[in-house]
């Protein structure tokens, strides 16, 4: 059996009514149409049950969404999404970049590569997604097929990894790596700021007498006190071991600097209560100025170390000569 296309026309043949017909073998075309229909059905089935959200929108209006898209945006039926503006789902923070991607697809046919963004679900909650998009034809006109998947948990994991990389796990203060990152990205070369380089005295003895946990408790307390004292004045970093840094933005006068240092010493020298005893500590403080004392990070830290060592020597002299309990060097 073959598939044919048949057409018949009434005519006159030798002055008598007759019919003339034409036959065309369309078996190949029918087979191709059948295969195409099967392919479309397979594609539709794949799209409908894809493990990623798929939304087709045309001129900014949602025309189709699969079951995973319903789930991700918090819809129960197709009607809840169909006819909605695609921008209704985009977080304000990402509106500009998403609009630019849509413009590039519509005007230049550029495929939008996977990008982190945030969606607003229909109930108002937010999820982090990774999304890509491609141009397609829908009813003979250009449309955009957007594919997205939930990366909220992965985002949390990445943020946790980043936190562990740039924040001290004991005090939760930004660490040396974060200090360097801020120096390179945030501190403008034209800016001026003052760095206080602090070293804790007495912590070694506390570790030896009462154990490492007691020493850790002291570090946590000191970090909290420094953060409280510098709440609106500067940024506090835990560098390593017994050392901290405080960055004071802008120009600081000698009078302001002395007042800040006195406040730091007063707060830190307060007794620290532990389980079985009370600890007393003091600080050495070195002071360096940016950019006078080094416009490059490692050079600046080197000068900060020198200032701190000088402060230790000065403090020892003060204690022997005047009984003073702290000192600074600028």
Image (tube, rainbow, N blue to C red):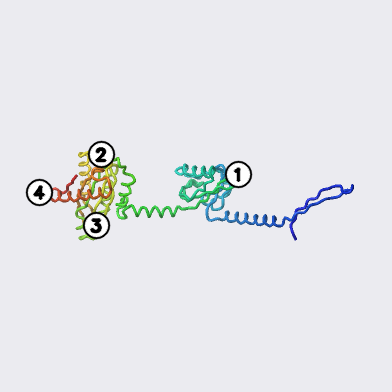
Left or right side of 78 for 168: left
Can you say which quadrant of the picture contains the N terminus? Answer: bottom right
Q: Which residue is the site of mark 2? A: 251
Q: Which residue is the site of mark 3? A: 215
Whether tag 3 and tag 4 are in contact, CB under 8 A, the answer is: no
As drawn, which residue projects farthest toward the left? 321
Whether tag 1 and tag 2 are in contact, CB under 8 A, the answer is: no
Q: Residue at x 24, y 56 (%)?
A: 274
Q: Position of residue 323 (x, y in %)?
A: 12, 49
The numbered mark, 3 or 4, whose residue comes first in the sequence reads: 3
**Mark 4: which secondary structure?**
helix
Mark number for residue 79?
none
The numbered mark, 4 or 1, whose residue comes first in the sequence reads: 1
Q: For the residues marked 4 and 1, what is the alpha-carbon distance in whole angstroms?
A: 89 Å
Q: Position of residue 160 (x, y in %)?
A: 38, 54
Left or right side of 247 for 114: right
**Mark 2: which secondary structure?**
loop
Q: Which residue is the site of mark 1? A: 141
Residue 70 is at least partly visible in this image: no
Q: Which residue is the site of mark 4? A: 321
Whether tag 4 and tag 2 are in contact, CB under 8 A, the answer is: no
Left or right side of 323 for 306: right
Q: For the residues marked 2 and 3, what is the alpha-carbon distance in whole angstroms?
A: 35 Å
Q: Position of residue 223 (x, y in %)?
A: 27, 50
Can you say which quadrant of the picture contains the C terminus? Answer: top left
The numbered mark, 2 or 3, whose residue comes first in the sequence reads: 3
Q: For the residues marked 3 and 1, what is the alpha-carbon distance in whole angstroms?
A: 70 Å
Q: Position of residue 206 (x, y in %)?
A: 21, 57
């Amino acid at each position: 059996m073959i598939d044919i296309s048949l057409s018949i026309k009434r005519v006159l043949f030798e002055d008598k009514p007759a019919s003339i017909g034409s036959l065309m073998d369309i078996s190949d075309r029918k087979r191709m149409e059948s295969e195409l229909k099967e392919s479309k059905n397979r594609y539709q089935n794949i799209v409908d049950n894809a493990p990623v959200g798929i939304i087709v929108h045309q001129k900014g209006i949602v025309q189709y969404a699969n079951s995973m898209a319903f789930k991700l945006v918090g819809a129960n039926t197709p009607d809840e999404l169909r006819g909605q503006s695609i921008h209704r789902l985009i977080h304000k923070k990402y509106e500009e970049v998403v609009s630019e991607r849509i413009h590039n697809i519509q005007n230049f046919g550029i495929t939008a590569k996977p990008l982190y963004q945030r969606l607003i679900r229909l109930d108002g909650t937010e999820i982090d997604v990774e999304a890509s998009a491609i141009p397609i034809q829908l009813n003979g006109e250009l449309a955009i097929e957007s594919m997205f998947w939930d990366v909220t948990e992965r985002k949390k994991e990445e943020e946790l990894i980043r936190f562990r990389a740039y924040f001290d796990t004991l005090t939760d203060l930004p660490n040396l790596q974060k200090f360097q990152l801020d120096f390179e990205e945030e501190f403008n070369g034209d800016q001026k700021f003052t760095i206080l380089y602090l070293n804790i005295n007495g912590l070694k003895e506390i570790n030896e007498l009462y154990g490492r946990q007691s020493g850790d408790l002291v570090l946590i307390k000191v970090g909290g006190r420094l953060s409280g004292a510098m709440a609106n004045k500067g940024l506090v970093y835990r560098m390593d071991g017994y050392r901290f840094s405080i960055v004071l933005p802008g120009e600081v006068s000698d009078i302001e600097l002395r007042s800040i240092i006195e406040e730091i010493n007063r707060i830190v020298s307060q007794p620290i209560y532990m389980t079985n005893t009370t600890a007393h500590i003091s600080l050495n403080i070195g002071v360096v100025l940016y950019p006078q004392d080094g416009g490059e990070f490692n050079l600046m830290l080197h000068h900060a170390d020198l200032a701190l060592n000088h402060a230790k020597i000065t403090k020892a002299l003060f204690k022997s000569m005047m009984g003073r309990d702290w000192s600074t060097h600028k």
